């Protein structure tokens, strides 16, 4: 059960990342069409993470339970940011583009960092390298997001 939940969690995360990148497209019609896929897969990613945690919660050490609890809260915050972007996209009143890009961008950076961190840990990278990769993911993601924000503001 745990492995199934992890696979579904990862698939939902990859789908959310791909659909979210495309939802930042300058073409509003594309963003509007792809957004339900992005938001749905983002929420499913969190749900499958909860399933994976529940499947083996009692086997986890206290420190691991705290870490996974924090990841769950981050997942909820990401899901909320996705929902906030959806409300902006649907309403499209006033200056909605920049906040929309910020919400979606935050979730994309968090997803990317998650992919990189999990891959580095799975490959046996030392802790210092995992931390460097995580910080690098945030820095590069923020730079890319600033470029998208500049286009959205124009």
Image (cartoon, rainbow, N blue to C red):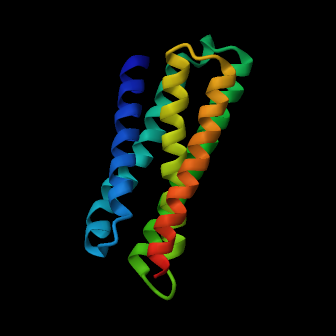
Q: Position of residue 90 (x, y in %)?
A: 39, 76
Q: Is residue 86 above or below residue 107?
A: below
57 left or right of 90? Answer: right
- Residue beneath the point at 55% across and 13% down: 124
- 121 is higher (above) or lower (below) than 141: above
Task: Please say whether residue 80 is visible from this viewpoint.
Answer: no
Looking at the picture, does residue 17 appear above or below residue 121? below
Residue lying at the far bottom of the rendered structure: 94
Residue 1 horizontal side relative to residue 66, left or right: left
Quarter where residue 113 is shown:
top right
User: Residue 30 falls in which quadrant of the image?
Assistant: bottom left
Q: Position of residue 89 (x, y in %)?
A: 41, 74
Q: x, y percentage for residue 154?
A: 46, 82
In the image, taking residue 134 as reference, residue 145 lies left or right, namely left
Give above or below for 59 relative to 130: above
| Residue 45: % across, % down | 43, 40
Of 3 and 10, which appears nearest the observer? 10
Q: Residue at horizontal 51%, vertical 70%?
A: 149
Residue depicted at x 43% and y 18%? 2
The answer to which of 84 and 154 lies nearer the viewer is: 154
Q: Quadrant of the N terminus?
A: top left
Which residue lies at the image location 64% right of the left edge and 16% below the top edge?
Answer: 126
């Amino acid at each position: 059960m745990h492995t199934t939940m992890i696979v579904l969690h990862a698939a939902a995360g990859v789908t959310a990342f791909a659909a979210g990148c495309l939802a930042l497209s300058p073409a509003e019609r594309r963003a509007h069409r792809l957004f339900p896929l992005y938001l749905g897969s983002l929420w499913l990613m969190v749900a499958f993470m909860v399933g994976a945690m529940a499947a083996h919660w009692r086997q986890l050490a206290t420190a691991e339970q705290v870490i996974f609890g924090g990841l769950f809260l981050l997942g909820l915050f990401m899901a909320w940011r996705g929902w906030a972007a959806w409300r902006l996209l649907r309403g499209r009143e006033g200056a909605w583009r920049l906040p929309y890009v910020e919400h979606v961008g935050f979730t994309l950076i968090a997803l990317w960092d998650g992919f990189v961190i999990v891959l580095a840990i799975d490959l046996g990278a030392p802790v210092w390298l995992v931390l460097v990769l995580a910080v690098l993911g945030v820095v590069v993601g923020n730079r890319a997001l600033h470029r998208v924000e500049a286009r959205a503001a124009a």
